[in-house]
Image (cartoon, rainbow, N blue to C red):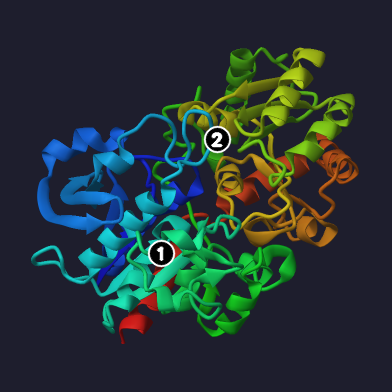
Amino acid sequence: MQVLMVASEGAPFVKTGGLADVVGALPAALSPLGVETRVVLPAYPALFPLLPTGKEVARFDDLPGGTGRIVEVTSGGITLFLLDAPQLFDRPGGLYVDEAGKDWTDNHLRFAALSMAGARIAMGAVDGYQPDVLHAHDWQAALAPVYLRMSGRDMPRSVITIHNIAFQGRFGPQVLDRLHLKTDWFHPEGLEFHGDLSFLKGALMFSDRITTVSPTYAREILTPEFGMGLEGVLQARSNVLSGLLNGIDTDAWNPADDAALAETYDVKTLKRKASNRIALSERLGLQVRTDGPLFCVISRLTSQKGLDALLEAVPHLVSRGAQLAVLGTGQPELEQGFRDAAELNPGQVAAYIGYDEPLSHLFQAGSDAILIPSRFEPCGLTQLYGLHYGTLPVVARTGGLADTVIDANVAAIAAKAATGFVFSDVSAVGLAAVIDRVVDAYADTKLWQAMQRAAMRHPVSWESSAKAYRDLYSDLVS
């Protein structure tokens, strides 16, 4: 079976978040199951070195935003179709924002071009290649199923995966003509969303299947609290909606052979994990201690992630003899807040404002627990990395966090099944309460080590979810 994925980012080539990890890992997980996957990505500057190693397989002169060519290249075991359109993607700044942190004003053109290129490849624009399924990811690729449906073709079939419904790709109706969209499709039963064009709504209306990244999130987005205004559309199409849990690349994330660690370890050599706490503490200027747990945060620093509540709870965390290490960037006020917390609590709190991939591995291995107090979380990957590294997740009861972490309640502890701590009240008070639970559990060495081992044995790979995607594709095609 042939599947064409369309996405705005994919690891290890270009990444801003979990979407890239999924796009980078899922094709490899599908391959042993008889699914050959190719991925359409924009040719951002980071991908320019790959262009001379590939071959041009298609050229389009009428994409939104101008001309683009498709360069096919294989790298890291993944076959890529790179959309080389320098006028759209060759620029400084981020993938979606300029150097000032504001959305690129032509994002509608940039990602409509990506979507149209993906749809045309799906319809046979590359000689000798015809996929069975077009699989689009998030709003940036969401017009691909729309362009496919506009063609009037029955095949290939289409899937849209919602990684975060908060981001919908909304633009004014004046862009319709420039995006080559049918104006008579601009109505509430089509592309229109409160007077705007919504890329994501278009995909929800016209894709054959809708998936999201955890079973709980699939239920949550049917409600006004989590549906971000699209719950009515999803309720109407709930018969084609499913939640398929993300996995992680256990080759790239494996404490037994991770080159970023001070000392590697596995479930049988768990004592070696302690060397990583020492290394992380020395790297960040924390006191080297073992009398209380070291919590970490590896995240975008935003209120969605509940980190405003955590900032308020830092004094309580320190008062309980625990330490905190933060890695990430985000809202300026939260970045400054964690810098201030580190200055007020030298040796007990450290903040690395930025992102460093190898350092994130050392954070996972060197910490005792990872805090993820998200107010909503479609799936989350850092809790899965935490489980695999024996770093117990402390998570809010939402989305994929609720689906992947087994709370250390009395029954789970008795059954030796507990893998972390789950709580519901995302506030300073709620966090203080769960921090108390973690500190108390850490003091019981036998219990803590039993939970670490249960966490490390918990399945976190793509194996079962890849089979679910294979079955979904097969059902579509049949």
Q: Quadrant of the C terminus?
A: bottom left
Q: Amino acid at mark 1?
A: Leu
Task: Give the class, few, some or many, for how many residues have Cα within 10 Å of label 1's Cα (few <14, many ≥20).
Answer: some
Q: Amino acid at mark 2?
A: Thr
Q: Sequence-wise, which precedes: disc 2 or disc 1? A: 1
Residue 142, quarter of picture: bottom left
- Please give left or right for residue 347 compared with residue 320 in the image: left
Q: Nearer the viewer, mark 2 or mark 1?
A: 1
Mark 2 lies on a secondary structure that is: helix
Residue at image point 20% right, 50% down: 67
- Where residue 176 is drawn, which disc sits there? 1
Residue at image point 17% right, 39% down: 51
- Where residue 68 is drawn, which disc sits there? none
Residue in front for this viewpoint, 63 or 260: 63
Say which residue label 2 marks: 269
Q: Are marks 2 and 1 in contact (CB under 8 Å)?
A: no
Whether residue 249 can be seen here: no
Whether residue 443 can be seen here: yes
- Please give left or right for residue 397 compared with residue 390 in the image: right
Give the x, y percent position of residue 147: 33, 70
Give the x, y percent position of residue 268: 55, 40
Mark 1 lies on a secondary structure that is: loop
